[in-house]
Image: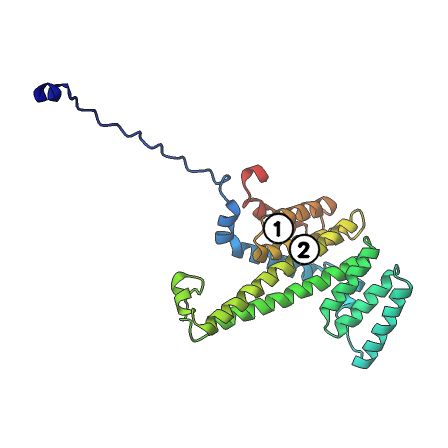
Amino acid sequence: MARGAAQTRRKQPAETQPKKRRQAAPSWEDQLFFSRLRRHAKYIYVLLALVFAVGFVAFGVGSGSTGISGALQSLFNGGSSGSSVNSRIKSDQKKIAAHPAVAANYTDIATLYQQKNDNAAAISALERGAKRNPKNLEILGALATAYRREAEAAKTEAQNAQAALNSTFFTQPGLDTSSTLGSAFTSDPVSQALKTKESSSFSKLSSTYTKAESAYQRVATASRGTSGEATAQLQLGSIALEALNYTGQPNEIQTAIGAFKRYLVIDPHGPNAAQAKQTLKQLQTFLPKSQR
């Protein structure tokens, strides 16, 4: 019987394992192209932003006839004593309460706040004015400049926080504090406090650049069809390039491209046209083909 049972046993053939299909590598359009872009092309955007900033100064961008330039310049002019400024602020506050729709009252009080180095109060006043006068270029231009000043201050703060962390004696020279090894050297309370400050500083920097870009977008929209639109589009493209380095948002590159394209439609032979074309061409090479 045992022999019969043995004869009836049949060895089951080993199950063949199905061959794993090798997944095709995704095309670079399907990848998170912007993440790779941020790793390899960040400094290109920094350079482009700097080039345009220098170009604006060289060609006098912002000195057009839209009326914005007066508001922008006034925010940087001081010269009054503290008591005089305070009394004038109170006077302007009364004017705003009595005539809330008068745009000049908001730009005037914002100028006074700037003389006191109170940029936050200036922004608050201009935001109230913009709510009352959503298309007033004097207010919107002054507001954009105020937000840009806030972004510049946040940039300095973030750079100082990063420098403080990198220069602490707990950190080895040339060691990336965000790496695994770098974290081991910066796990002490002092370094942790510096890392927290650095992180919050860069979060603030990203937020302020987003606000600045939004303000310049409002200027560009309100300037549509006016003689100052070309300047507004260049300013928008420039701030979008700067914001790209700190917010990490893909829409920044689209904003910059849209602004430079619009500028070239308005002023194809203007003093900044060649520069805009070159920057636009470089920006488009970083996009997936479907988005160019």
Look at label 1 and name its amino acid. Answer: Glu
Residue 11 occupies quadrant:
top left
Q: Position of residue 98 (x, y in %)?
A: 91, 65
The reply, left or right, for residue 153 in relation to residue 144 is left
The reply, left or right, for residue 180 in relation to residue 87 is left
Q: Position of residue 172 (x, y in %)?
A: 40, 71
Q: Position of residue 189 (x, y in %)?
A: 46, 73
Residue 246 occupies quadrant:
bottom right
Look at label 2 and name its amino acid. Answer: Glu
Residue at screen point 56% across, 37% down: 290
Contact between marks 2 and 1 (CB within 8 A): the answer is yes
Give whichever of 64, 180 is nearer the camera: 180
- The outermost residue toward the right is 98
User: Can you see residue 81?
Assistant: no
The residue pinned by badge 1 equals: 252
User: Can you see residue 204?
Assistant: yes
Residue 105 occupies quadrant:
bottom right
Q: Secondary structure at mark 1?
A: helix
| Residue 140, numbered circle | none
| Residue 213, numbered circle | 2
